Image (cartoon, rainbow, N blue to C red):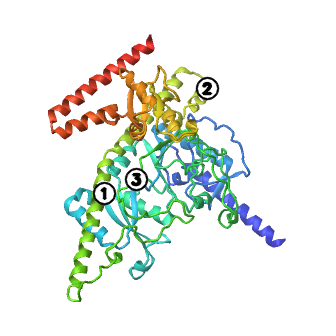
Amino acid sequence: DGDNDDNEGARNSSIRAADAFCERQLSSDPALPSPPLQILEGSSASVHAPMARAPPLELVGSTRVDVAYSGGELSVSVREAERVSSLTAARMERERRLFLVLDIDHTLLHAVSAAPSAATALALRRVADLHPHIAEQIIALNVFPLGAQPPPSAAASSALSFHVKLRPGLMKFLRGLGGKYELHIYTMGTRAYADAVARVIDPEHALFQGRIVSRDDFAEGAVNQKSLRRVFPCDDSMVLVVDDREDVWHAAQPRHITRQPAEKRFRSSAPPPPPPPLDGNDAMPNLLKARPYCFFDGLEEAYDRTSRTGVVSTSSCTPSASSAPATTPVSPEKSSKSATGDEEQRVEDAANALLQRWLAAEERDRNHLAKLSNVLEKCHERFYAARDEMRDKVTEQGARSRVANAISAGNVMRELRRSVLQGCVLVFSGVFAVGTDVRSAWLWRMAERFGAECHERMNARVSHVVLDARRGADTEKARLAKERSDCVWLVTIRWLLRSCEEFERASELECGLESEEQTTSAAKRGEAEKEEDVVSELAARRAEKDRRRLAARLA
């Protein structure tokens, strides 16, 4: 009993010390930019007016909340979390900034295991010789399990080696948004890997300032799940997320994720319950989905997203020169030269294939971060414009605060997303298998999420027939659309995917069956002037179609 009393007293003492620590930090001048405890207090996102009291929160399970970026080792009371949230939101409002949570892998960069391979080494040398501007963004990264650099003698045995390629325009993207957003990292990589990447992209610690969450920090990381409430436990109305995957995020959660005992968090073999499935109603509206960045096409990923540890073996999926099968010798004298020649040719061919894939990926992704940056800047502008407009219409201080709280970054992002395909009425042809519940299909739900109106059958309001290039061209829907060619577009699935990836309506001229046929025909004849005429004609036809469709709707 005496030991239990001592343990309870020590626990209460630690809790009081943590609360006192937060109290001392919060008592400092909140106008000072990013105080040292900002790393700890960065767990707020409520939209409150200065001096406005935070609304009461619904308690779930416990009355203590884990502090962000403490690795689950520090918790504060709900009252302290609410106060930190309110003060941090007031500071962000004065600075007119928002929070931005960034994923690492396939969002900011691409990392692969640096397994020994003659073909890979040759391809990397050719990138350095022929494309030095790309080679500058390829980094050899060594990650040590404990996150600390061991002596040089132990480096070879304990380090995991990766090739890391930064996404085109990454540093411009981060620095450009730093004035309008407070940047955070949330990755499914290990803590050591996340810290190593942060040292590369933020060597001066000016962008993230320690605001990093990894899979090692909380229990849900063991089953490849992320929880925004770990970073913003009170409110996420000023938070936006950029990630290449949405399925890893918890879609619906209680207002708090409360603290559990360490033995339950880290020693229990039972995983936490799975997150609720995402639906087509924009379950996580504040997420801006990035197109997955895969530069090192043909090499093994740095982390396996389906494993519990996340770490993959260091063997390369690209056959190396040493693993290629040897040819059967014709004679003892010629065997050595023949095998060497075949081996060199195989390495040469594999390196050329890798190089072509890498350059194609780089070209395809050249401007993607710039487009995401434009969306984020537009969301920031509309968020504060809407708040300012709301507040100008209300005179009472308390009412002004409540009105402002109703505006969230997620709602603004939802409206921006829906504006991409707003006004487009779609039917699908040859896309879904017979008997499929088309309304639950991901393409259907994605189109609705981006503002399109989807129908199962042709009608007078349809503006686009989205079809499979092979199976949908000769269907009844396609025939009816061709009869109404004055106001209906026949486009491939690529049009829908590109519109959603680029966050703007793609050109029907580039993704339509008709335009592809005409452009291909002109290219085969080698008539550049004819191609220009085709493009001009299609542009005029598109404008005419839009005009007739609008006139038909008005009539």
Can you tell which of label 3 and label 1 is closer to the viewer?
A: 1
* Label 2 – label 1 distance at C-alpha: 55 Å
* Whether residue 89 is situated above or below residue 304 in the rendered picture: above
Q: Secondary structure at mark 3?
A: loop
Q: Earlier in the sequence, mark 3 or mark 1?
A: 3
Q: Nearer the viewer, residue 554 or 369?
A: 554
* Label 3 – label 1 distance at C-alpha: 16 Å
- Give residue 492's position: percent from left, percent from top: 39, 37
The quarter holding residue 264 reads bottom right
- Give residue 362's position: percent from left, percent from top: 30, 52
Q: Residue furthest right?
A: 1
Residue visible at 31% across and 74% down in the picture:
321
Residue 108 disc label: 3
Residue kind at label 3, given as amino acid type = Leu
How busy is the neighbourhood of tag 3: few (under 14 within 10 Å), some, or many (20 plus)?
Answer: many
Q: Secondary structure at mark 2?
A: helix
How busy is the neighbourhood of tag 1: few (under 14 within 10 Å), some, or many (20 plus)?
Answer: many
Give left or right: position of 362 versus 499.
Answer: left
Residue visible at 34% across and 51% down in the picture:
171
Residue visible at 56% across and 57% down in the picture:
224
Please tell me how many numbered marks the rendered image carries. Answer: 3
Q: Residue furthest bottom?
A: 332
Q: Earlier in the sequence, mark 2 or mark 1?
A: 1
- Give residue 459's position: percent from left, percent from top: 49, 22
Give left or right: position of 67 versus 305.
Answer: right
Can you tell which of label 2 and label 1 is closer to the viewer?
A: 1
Please give the residue where the numbered disc 1 appears in the rendered image: 358
Residue kind at label 2, given as amino acid type = Ala
Q: Quadrant of the C terminus?
A: top left
Residue 399 disc label: 2
Residue kind at label 1, given as amino acid type = Trp
